[in-house]
Image (cartoon, helix red, strand yellow):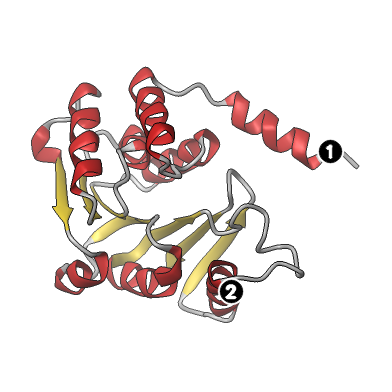
């Protein structure tokens, strides 16, 4: 059987990020922000492209790595991004501008996602990316499915949480939250789901 770790590393190294994304990633590492991996970014870009997305929302801005990847696949889309860290959003705003994204195509909302999301219009987004506090991931995904249009996709990176979710001896609140999410999704008829091992795991949910 092939070495899975070698295959994972090959898939990650296969992706060459644009300079603007690479710079945002470097900044993210410096701040200790856990951004999506390059291969995960390429996969979400493919999904936004395949969806012909025009309206995207992400829960968790970081410093712009995930947003830049989302817009790579759908450069004409409008991106709404929510985060309570205004300093991170300032960095993300600069990254978007340096990447040539018009300011009117990015809407950054500062605030706690659980306070902001109930005010967002339901069934209004082609793609929803959930990359915020994993302890609230189930609530975020519930909101994401409400916000996604029929046929829209909700993306949840980091869902394998540093290889701990698949290891039955691992415990902890974050591991338990992701396991609970995966159990709920597996039992749901409301979505078509796929779990990819790319990066730190990427859960993909298309709303029926």
Q: Mark 1 points at which residue?
A: 3
Q: Quadrant of residue 164?
A: bottom right
Q: Mark 2 points at which residue?
A: 176
Identify the residue at horizontal 46%, vertical 38% (top origin): 41
Image quarter where the C terminus lies is: bottom left
Identify the residue at horizontal 77%, vertical 33% (top origin): 6
User: Which marked residue is nearer to the observer: mark 2 or mark 1?
Assistant: 2
Identify the residue at horizontal 36%, vertical 30% (top origin): 27
Q: Could you classify mark 2 by the number of other residues whose Cα lies within 10 Å: few (under 14), some (14-19), or many (20 or more)?
A: some
Between 16 and 72, the one nearer to me in the picture: 16
Q: In the rendered image of this protein, does residue 9 appear above or below residue 186?
A: above
Identify the residue at horizontal 24%, vertical 68% (top origin): 123
Q: Could you classify mark 1 by the number of other residues whose Cα lies within 10 Å: few (under 14), some (14-19), or many (20 or more)?
A: few
As helix, strand or loop, the secondary structure at mark 2 comes to helix
Residue 186 coordinates in the image, percent (x, y): 60, 75
Q: In the rendered image of this protein, does residue 161 appear above or below residue 52?
A: below
């Amino acid at each position: 059987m092939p070495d899975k770790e070698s295959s994972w590393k090959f898939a990650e190294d296969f992706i060459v990020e644009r300079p603007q994304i690479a710079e945002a990633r470097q900044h993210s590492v410096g701040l200790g922000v856990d951004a999506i991996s390059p291969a995960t970014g390429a996969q979400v870009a493919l999904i936004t492209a395949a969806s012909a997305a025009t309206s995207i929302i992400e829960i968790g801005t970081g410093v712009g790595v995930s947003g830049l990847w989302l817009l790579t696949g759908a450069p004409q889309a409008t991106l709404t991004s929510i985060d309570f860290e205004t300093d991170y959003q300032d960095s993300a705003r600069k990254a978007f501008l340096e990447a040539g994204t018009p300011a009117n195509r990015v809407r950054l909302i500062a605030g706690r996602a659980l306070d902001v999301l109930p005010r967002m219009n339901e069934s209004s987004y082609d793609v929803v990316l959930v990359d915020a506090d994993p302890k609230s991931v189930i609530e975020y995904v519930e909101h994401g499915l409400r916000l996604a249009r029929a046929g829209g996709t909700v993306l949840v990176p980091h869902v394998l949480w540093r290889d701990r979710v698949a290891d039955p001896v691992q415990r902890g609140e974050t591991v338990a939250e992701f396991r609970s999410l995966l159990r709920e999704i597996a039992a749901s008829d409301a979505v078509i789901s796929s779990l990819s091992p790319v990066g730190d795991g990427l859960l993909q949910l298309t709303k029926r």
